[in-house]
Image: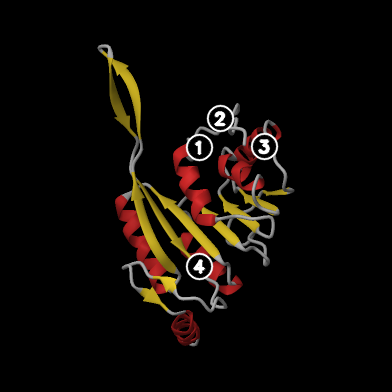
Amino acid sequence: MSRVALPHDAKAGPTKPEVRAVLMSKLALSDADHFVEVGSCTGAVTIEAARRAGRVTALERKPDRLDVTRKNLDANDTDAPVDLRAAEAPEGIPDDATALFLGGSRNYEAVLDRAVAAGIDRVVMNVSRLEVAGAATQAFRERDVLDEVVQFQVSHGYELAGATSFDSENPVYMLVGSADVSDGDDRVAADGGRTPATDKQTRSGTEGSR
């Protein structure tokens, strides 16, 4: 699979290739999926998803950034049809989405509520700030959609005095979960235990009646 080319700049750095690799692994997209990205920016994640999913919808509230998404998408080989929407989540999220990625923290609680209402199977959010990561983790837990939190950091080598030293990127917190209560299999809880789907359905139904 060819690398993602990003010849156009959105003045907001793209999700790094190593982070995208982990993200795609967690999403496990197939041609049966309708993937939605909230905040497409440079289009890096949209492009990766369009090489795996059956359909892709990319939301971006800033017209100039949506234009960058479009230009970078045109510069790459992709298979899936991509619907670019100048919209702010959660309003622009389609009803039949099966996988959702939040690349930023704007309106994330409303987006999670929309994911729960739509029963979206896979929901992933990337966060770089510790305080936001804590609040977002709590928001995932309150909606009973959290499977795991992954924290990782990537370093890139560079030559220094004839040897190799490393520059480290900021740590990334990746929240992974599901708002689909129809899956009968047990799921891995954030603490490493098991969360039976039947229990999740019961709790979700109780919370929804409040």
Between the residue at mark 4 and the residue at mark 1, the CA separation in whole angstroms equals 25 Å
In the picture, the disc for residue 9 is 2
Horizontal side of residue 73 vs 101, given as left or right = right
Q: Which residue is mark 3?
A: 73
Of labels 1 and 2, earlier in sequence is 2
- Give coordinates of residue 83: x percent, y percent: 72, 50
Question: In the image, 96: left or right of 152?
Answer: right
Report helix, strand or loop for mark 3.
helix
Amino acid at pointer 1: Pro
The amino acid marked with disc number 2 is: Asp
Find the residue positioned furthest to the top. Answer: 162
Q: Is residue 164 above or below residue 113?
A: above
The answer, for residue 103, to whether it is visible in the render is no
* Marks 1 and 3, how far apart at CA: 13 Å
Q: Is residue 17 above or below residue 111?
A: above
**Quadrant position of residue 95:** bottom right
